[in-house]
């Protein structure tokens, strides 16, 4: 998120709000044009609004770790009961 914010601020200051809005939409395509404009304006004034920050964070965060989505093909056999040690 910080990298996106830095890029958007720098773009807005050097090339203008329109280019900054394009950078936001390129990074977070889920945002509409209106939301991107609001995001850029808010970043230039300080920080991003909470509702737009949440949308951007959700879009930029990867969904799940591959290991967490593994499907079991075959069940394991039950273990034999161990005798208690003396």
Image (cartoon, grey):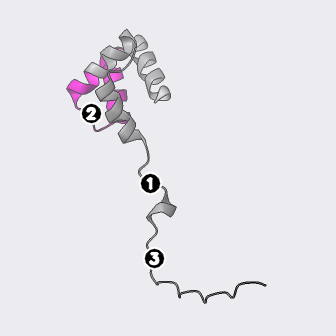
Q: Quadrant of residue 72?
A: bottom left
* Residue 53 left/right relative to 70: left
Q: Residue at x 43, y 12 (%)?
A: 14
Q: In the image shown, does 51 or 8 lie closer to the viewer? A: 51
Q: Mark 1 or 3 closer to N-term? A: 1
- Give the quarter of the image for residue 55: top left
Is residue 23 a member of the stretch shown in magenta? yes
Q: Which residue is identified by label 2?
A: 31
Secondary structure of the residue carrying numbered label 2: loop
Above-or-below relation of 37 to 76: above
Other residues around mark 3 within 10 Å, as few (<14) / some (14–19) / many (≥20):
few
Point out which mark residue 50 bears. none
The residue lying at 43 percent from left, 42 percent from top is: 61
Left or right: residue 84 versus residue 40 is right
Helix, strand or loop at label 3? It is: loop
Residue under circle 3? 72
Q: Residues within 10 Å of mark 2 (few under 14, many from 20)?
A: some
Q: Earlier in the sequence, mark 2 or mark 1?
A: 2
Question: In the figure, 22 relative to 13: above or below?
Answer: below
Which residues lie in the magenta part? 16-37
Q: Quadrant of residue 73?
A: bottom left
Dominant secondary structure (helix, strand or loop) of the stretch shown in magenta: helix
């Amino acid at each position: 998120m910080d990298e996106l914010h830095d890029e958007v601020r720098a773009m807005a200051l050097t090339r203008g709000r329109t280019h900054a809005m394009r950078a936001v939409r390129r990074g977070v395509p889920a945002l509409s044009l209106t939301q991107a404009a609001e995001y850029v304006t808010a970043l230039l004034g300080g920080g991003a609004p909470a509702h737009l920050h949440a949308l951007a964070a959700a879009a930029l965060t990867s969904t799940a770790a591959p290991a967490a989505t593994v499907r079991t093909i075959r069940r394991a056999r039950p273990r034999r009961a161990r005798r208690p040690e003396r």
